[in-house]
């Protein structure tokens, strides 16, 4: 799986016909098996980029290719910023949606139940989303994206609303799934430490619509102790310096 964005631009037009060019001549490539984070100040277009890659939005200019083919809706696994679990469906029925919508996808209920157990939701198979904590809902939403069985997963701030401890557990868990299943991940976060800890590469979006790539040289596998290392702290500090002096 290779994802390529070539000279992609996108402009929002509001009700009063005012235009806001959010993405301008963007180029990026994500290779099979990579873990890449997108960071940048609020409003720099991170979520918009994911929506363009999913096909929910259509770029005005440029090309988006997955394995050399134009991307279309349903080609990638996507977890939006809000979890969008259907409130009237049980957790198991929420995560089985992938199989209902994709005829060629064969996930049995037993397999889905097995996955629920792996994310600590074994007891919640028949619960409704509003009976779960924020962290549990995020795990369920992540499973729903994972079970679409796509090589490329786009995750929009999946751990943004979690407390620090749950977040650490989820990060370790995500890294283990990514390695085990050989997925390719494009991940949005505002948490610079998280971006350093998880990624092979970080793409920083500047308010002037230019982007900058930063390679993360930290060794793998990554263990939670790394979060306390001088290397990671130094890298985080460098990123913070790049971002803080910018105005959107
Ligand atoms: N549906 C929409 N209609 C009009 N403008 C929009 C729409 N969605 C986003 N925008 C604008 O596009 C710009 C980029 O938004 P986007 O959500 O992609 O940024 P972001 O970097 O993901 O922000 P955040 O970090 O706050 O989630 C913002 O100026 C936003 O106001």
Image (cartoon, helix red, strand yellow):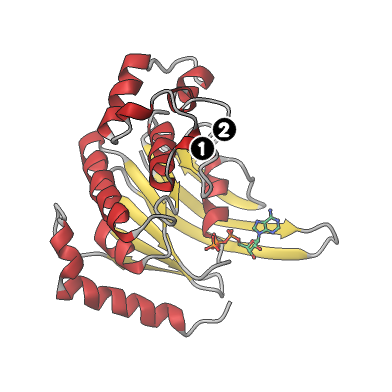
On-image quarter of the C terminus? bottom right
Residue matched to label 1: 130
Q: Residues within 10 Å of mark 1 (few under 14, many from 20)?
A: some
Whether the residue carrying mark 2 lies under 8 Å from ligand 1 is answered with no
Residues under numbered marks 1 and 2 in contact, where contact means CB atoms less than 8 Å apart: yes
Q: In what element is the residue under mark 2?
A: loop
* Nearest to N terminus: mark 1 or mark 2: 2
Residue matched to label 2: 87
Check residue 152 in the rendering and tell me which mark sits there, or answer none.
none
- 115 or 103, nearer to the observer: 115
Please name which of the two marks, 1 or 2, marks the residue nearer to the observer. 1
Horizontal side, residue 175 vs residue 64: left or right: left
Quadrant for ligand 1? Answer: bottom right
Tell me if residue 171 comes above or below residue 88 in the rendering. Answer: below
- 18 or 230, nearer to the observer: 230
Horizontal side, residue 180 vs residue 28: left or right: left
**Residue at (59%, 61%) from the top-left corner?**
23
Give residue 208's quadrant in the image.
bottom right
On-image quarter of the N terminus? top left
Q: Position of residue 194 (x, y in %)?
A: 31, 61
Q: Can residue 108 be seen in this snapshot?
A: no
**Residue at (59%, 52%) from the top-left corner?**
62
**Residue at (42%, 18%) from the top-left corner?**
105
- 141 or 245, nearer to the observer: 141
Q: Position of residue 244 (x, y in %)?
A: 45, 81
Q: Position of residue 120 (x, y in %)?
A: 28, 35
């Amino acid at each position: 799986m290779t994802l390529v964005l070539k000279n992609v631009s996108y402009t929002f037009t509001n009700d009063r016909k005012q235009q806001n060019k959010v993405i301008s001549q963007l180029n990026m490539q994500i290779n099979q098996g990579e873990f890449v984070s997108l960071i940048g100040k609020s409003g720099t277009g991170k979520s918009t980029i994911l929506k363009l890659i999913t096909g929910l939005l259509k770029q005005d200019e440029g090309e988006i290719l997955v394995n050399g083919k134009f991307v279309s809706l349903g080609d990638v696994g996507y977890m939006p910023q809000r979890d969008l679990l259907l409130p009237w469906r049980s957790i198991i029925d929420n995560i089985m949606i992938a199989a209902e919508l994709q005829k060629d996808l064969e996930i049995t209920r037993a397999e889905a139940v097995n996955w629920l157990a792996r994310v600590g939701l074994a007891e919640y198979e028949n619960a409704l989303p509003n009976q779960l904590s924020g962290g549990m809902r995020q795990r369920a939403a992540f499973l729903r994206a994972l079970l679409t069985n796509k090589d490329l997963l786009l995750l929009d701030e999946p751990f943004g609303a979690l407390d620090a401890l749950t977040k650490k557990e989820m990060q370790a868990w995500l890294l283990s799934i990514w390695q085990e299943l050989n997925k390719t991940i494009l991940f949005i976060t505002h948490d610079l430490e998280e971006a350093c800890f998880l990624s092979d590469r970080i793409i920083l979006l500047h308010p002037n619509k230019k982007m900058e790539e930063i390679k993360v040289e930290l060794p793998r596998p990554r263990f939670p102790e790394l979060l306390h290392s001088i290397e990671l702290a130094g890298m985080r500090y460098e990123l913070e310096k790049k971002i803080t002096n910018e105005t959107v």
